[in-house]
Image (cartoon, grey):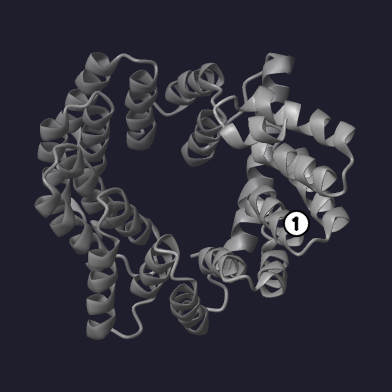
């Protein structure tokens, strides 16, 4: 979950990260040599990795390893980047060497398992994840990965067993709940998923992750009123549960309660990480209310934040089409088509 305290911590983390990145670039320009602690360097590497700047991540990693050659996390990250570069055999070799120095470190087995998932060696992935479970205090994430691997092998019984295990350890972490929903949705067993979520709630009426899963399953099943009921209970347990807010707003929208959806979506706008999606959803609600200028305003805001999101331009086109402003509608639907040629809806409007 993501509450106000988490958000403030995230903002502080971003501030420190920006400072470190600036200091590193200054060091490179000045051709000097500054000291950074291992944790800061790891954060910088992961920042570049998340932004698909793998060359930059590798550059910082090599600098980091010179400063901290024996740091476990940096050595683990080295194997991760080698794998991302497509050198899986070398990555596994590095992990085998690291295991000799750090036996019983669960992160080594998790990364081995993830590499095997990437190259579709699902049985081998299961082997490593099952070792990792034995060393993990809170194995939620590992059970989620096991469930995914078993699902790829069409072993749905074992996959379900693992995802239910993940839910046992989920506490207030959202990953297991979302995988739980995805499992029953992808396998076409939404009703069974709803039953399992209700069983978890019967065992613990305050299991917020079970309520969240139930609400999402009902939302996927288009049972909007039941989804609202479950997600409102989530909010009663934790009023700062951001993901539940967003899904509840979606349920309100599905039920035709657009004003309530807009109010809730706007409440989440202070969390900038979700701003593009939220602006788009607000635009959709205004569009359905027939308030086309307001809809267009929010679609435009969404497109400014995420310029490659084709649906925002389609939304703008729809607002113009509803006002019979065909030239503007055509202009924006062509942008949507250029970004995504697979949507038949776009071509129907064009």
Q: 163 or 287, which is in the foreground?
A: 287
Q: Count the marks.
A: 1
**Spot occupied by residue 265 in the image (x, y as percentages of width and height):** 67, 65
Horizontal side, residue 264 vs residue 92: left or right: right
For the C terminus, the image quarter is: top right
**Spot occupied by residue 139 in the image (x, y as percentages of width and height):** 23, 56
Tag 1's secondary structure?
helix
Q: Residue at 36%, 36% (x, y): give it.
A: 73
Q: Residue at 19%, 24% (x, y): give it.
A: 97
Quarter where residue 112 is shown: top left
Q: 137 or 238, which is in the foreground?
A: 238
Residue topped by disc 1: 287
Question: Do we see residue 21 in this rendering?
Answer: yes
Q: Residue at 34%, 78% (x, y): give it.
A: 207
Residue 112's place in the image compared with 84, above or below, is below
Q: 337 or 308, which is in the foreground?
A: 337
Question: Do we see residue 169 in this rendering?
Answer: no
Residue 109's place in the image compared with 157, above or below, is above
**Spot occupied by residue 255 in the image (x, y as percentages of width and height):** 57, 71
Q: Residue at 51%, 84% (x, y): give it.
A: 236
Residue 259's place in the image compared with 29, above or below, is below
**Spot occupied by residue 185 in the image (x, y as percentages of width and height):** 32, 54
Quarter where residue 96 is shown: top left
Horizontal side, residue 307 vs residue 91: left or right: right
Residue 288's place in the image compared with 119, above or below, is below
């Amino acid at each position: 979950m993501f509450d106000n305290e988490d958000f403030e911590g995230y903002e502080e983390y971003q501030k420190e990260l920006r400072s470190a990145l600036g200091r590193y670039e200054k060091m490179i320009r000045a051709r000097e040599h500054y000291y950074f602690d291992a944790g800061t360097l790891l954060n910088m590497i992961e920042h570049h990795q998340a932004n698909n700047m793998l060359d930059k991540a590798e550059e910082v990693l090599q600098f980091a390893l010179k400063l901290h050659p024996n740091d476990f996390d940096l050595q683990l990250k080295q194997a991760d980047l080698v794998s991302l570069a497509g050198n899986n055999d070398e990555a596994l070799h590095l992990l085998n060497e690291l295991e000799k120095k750090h036996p019983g470190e669960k992160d080594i087995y998790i990364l081995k398992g993830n590499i095997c998932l990437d190259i579709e060696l699902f049985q081998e992935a299961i082997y490593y994840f099952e070792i990792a479970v034995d060393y993990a205090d809170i194995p939620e994430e590992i059970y989620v990965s096991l469930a995914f691997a078993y699902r790829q092998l069409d072993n749905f019984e074992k996959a379900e067993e693992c995802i239910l295990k993940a839910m046992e350890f989920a506490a207030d972490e959202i990953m297991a709940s979302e995988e739980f929903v995805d499992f029953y949705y992808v396998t076409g067993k939404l009703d069974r998923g709803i039953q399992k979520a209700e069983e978890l709630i019967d065992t613990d009426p305050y299991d917020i992750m079970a309520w969240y899963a139930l609400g999402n399953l009902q939302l996927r099943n288009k049972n909007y009123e039941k989804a609202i009921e479950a997600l409102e209970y989530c909010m009663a347990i934790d009023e700062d549960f951001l993901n539940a807010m967003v899904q509840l707003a979606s349920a309100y929208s599905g039920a035709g309660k657009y004003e309530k959806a807009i109010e809730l979506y706007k409440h989440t706008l202070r969390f900038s990480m979700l701003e593009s999606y939220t602006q788009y959803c607000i635009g959709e609600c205004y569009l359905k209310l027939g308030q086309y200028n307001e809809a267009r305003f929010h679609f435009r805001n969404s497109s400014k934040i995420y310029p490659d999101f084709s649906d925002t331009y389609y939304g703008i086109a729809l607002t113009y089409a509803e006002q019979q402003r065909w030239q503007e509608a055509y202009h924006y639907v062509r942008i949507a088509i250029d970004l995504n040629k697979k949507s038949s809806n776009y071509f129907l409007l064009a």
